[in-house]
Image (cartoon, helix red, strand yellow):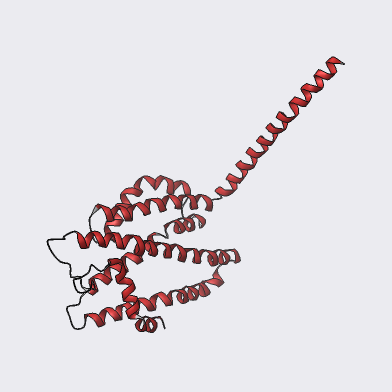
Amino acid sequence: MGASLTWYLREEIFRLLVAPAEGGLSPFGGLPVFTAPTEMLGATIHLAMLGGGVVAFPVATAAVFSLASPLLSRKQRRFLLLFVPVLFVFFLGGAAFAYFVMLPVGLRFLLHFGEGIAIPMVRLTEYMSLVTALIFWLGVVFELPAAMFLLTKLRLMTHGRLRRYRKYVPAAAFVLSAIITPTFDVVNQVMVAAPIIVLYEVGLIFSWLAEGGHKLLARRIWNRMKWVARAVKKAAVWPVRWVWRQVRRIC
């Protein structure tokens, strides 16, 4: 069903995926080109398969959950029912970042880098491979905080160990950004690496919450509130006592 719907709406989907290039893929109306008779058909079939995978993913997730449900406790099933939609939301956030931020800026740099020297004529298959890879992998990268929360919740990792790994994150982020992005310019590297570093910091907060850090924070706040209440009470009672002593001394 997903592949059929993608095939039926292929023109609209292709226009949507070409939009971040802002009409700079070729001098022929800004559209990508194909150089082989079967290239356009192959790209359309590939797009239909991707659409089928996107539509089938919730069904596959539900099937896996139903198979694993008898092996899980009631608490674990409830946790997974809440956790899977959160993963999906994080993935959509990463895909949106790739489509609305990463692709327009990166393609603008790449397509205008040789302006005045050469004219870009980008093939459809190469452009589709770039766009789909960036959207998918940045969606996966944005699931890092949720993955860190899950690992800590399942006691496969601790918050302290994840904090010790923090010093390696910047270098690993730039290596990963070099793998994800097809170019070696600093702008694209930073645009991918910076979110990874920030997401790891967010994941540390999630890991801390998974270990019960919110309970410790609530206990500290409660103790601080009791201390403040006692201080306010003493500050309010002291003038009354002083006035009472003065009255007794006069009397």
Viewer-closest of 62 and 181: 181
Residue 34 lies, with reference to residue 165, above or below; the image says below
Instruction: Give coordinates of residue 89: x percent, y percent.
Output: 46, 64
Q: Residue furthest front?
A: 29
Task: Identify the residue at horizontal 15%, vertical 66% (top origin).
Answer: 119
Residue ID at (22%, 61%):
110
* In-image side of 55 versus 75 (left or right): left
Q: Nearer the viewer, residue 24 or 147?
A: 24
**Numbered disc total:** 0
What residue is rendered at 48% in x and 56% in y? Answer: 149
154 sits left or right of 108 in the view: right
- At which x and y percent is residue 158? 47, 50
Q: Which image quadrant: the N terminus? A: bottom left
Q: Quadrant of the C terminus?
A: top right
Is residue 230 left or right of 14 when viewed as pictured? right
Outermost residue to the top: 250
- Indicate the position of residue 229 as horizontal and vertical percent values: 69, 36
Q: Residue at x 20, y 61 (%)?
A: 112
Q: Nearer the viewer, residue 170 or 105?
A: 105
Q: Residue 157 at what x, y percent from top left? A: 46, 53
Q: Quadrant of residue 53?
A: bottom left
Q: Residue furthest left?
A: 117
